[in-house]
Image (spheres, rainbow, N blue to C red):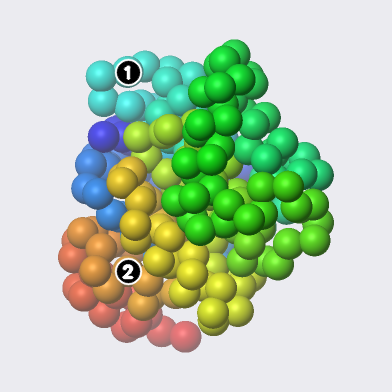
Amino acid sequence: MIILDNVSVEKAARRVLRGVSLELGERRIGVIGRNGSGKSTFARLLNGLEKPSSGSVRLAGGEGPNTLRRAVGFVFQNPDNQIVYPIVSEDLEFGLKNLKLPKDERRTRIDAALERFGISHLADRFTHELSGGEKQLVAMAGVLVMQPEMIVFDEPTTLLDLWNARTVKAAIDALDQHVVLVTHDLDLLADFDRVILIEAGAVAADGDPQTVIARYREQPA
């Protein structure tokens, strides 16, 4: 469980988030809101990519940003911001080398992650040759090999066509980890446990998908 206690974030004298207090423990949590509402900043807080200006973000039973980074993986909207090595298997191995894991264990984790997403055939491919959907699955595999307890996704289907978006959705649904999904695609959240609506940097609604999504749809254009 991640606990946010009266969290505010200010950037360039503008308050992006204000007074957010939440406990995130459900298996599937969606986050929605208009562009500029603060939801991407909210997502980045959950694994320490963003630091609060005031308040605290912590893992239940743990302290500090290092604990968050180890426990919470993050998948960016654009996988090109996440993939750093030219060969798929090399990219997946990068984080594992930082953990100083033995080579055999690194290989086992990489093979398992690629197989999990049905992309074992991409192991030796150049990352720049991959389609958008393939890149997003590789980015997800790169997070999965680190064995986080939770994975946060920041609009992972926005840059994808319908077929690839469905592929990524199915991959997310199959994850054992707890998931926080920031998205504009409301259909992705129909079977989620909980949806949080962020408006003007604050939590405007928090509850079951049907109720919160209905509230979001009622917002004036």
Viewed as shown, does residue 42 lie left or right of 22? right
Tag shown at residue 62: 1
Is 187 on the left or on the right of 212, as rendered?
right
Which residue type carries mark 2?
Leu
Marks 1/2: CA–CA distance: 29 Å
176 is higher (above) or lower (below) than 166: above
Does 90 appear above or below 32?
above
Residue 102 x/y as whole percent = 57, 15
Describe the element under mark 2 as helix, strand or loop: helix
* Residue at 27% in and 42% down: 24
Mark 2 neighbour density, 10 Å: few (under 14) some (14–19) many (20 or more): many
Rendered view: 210 above or below 49: below
The amino acid beneath tag 1 is Gly
Residue 52 placed where, x, y %?
49, 32
User: Is residue 48 among what the camera can see?
Assistant: no
- Residue at label 2? 189
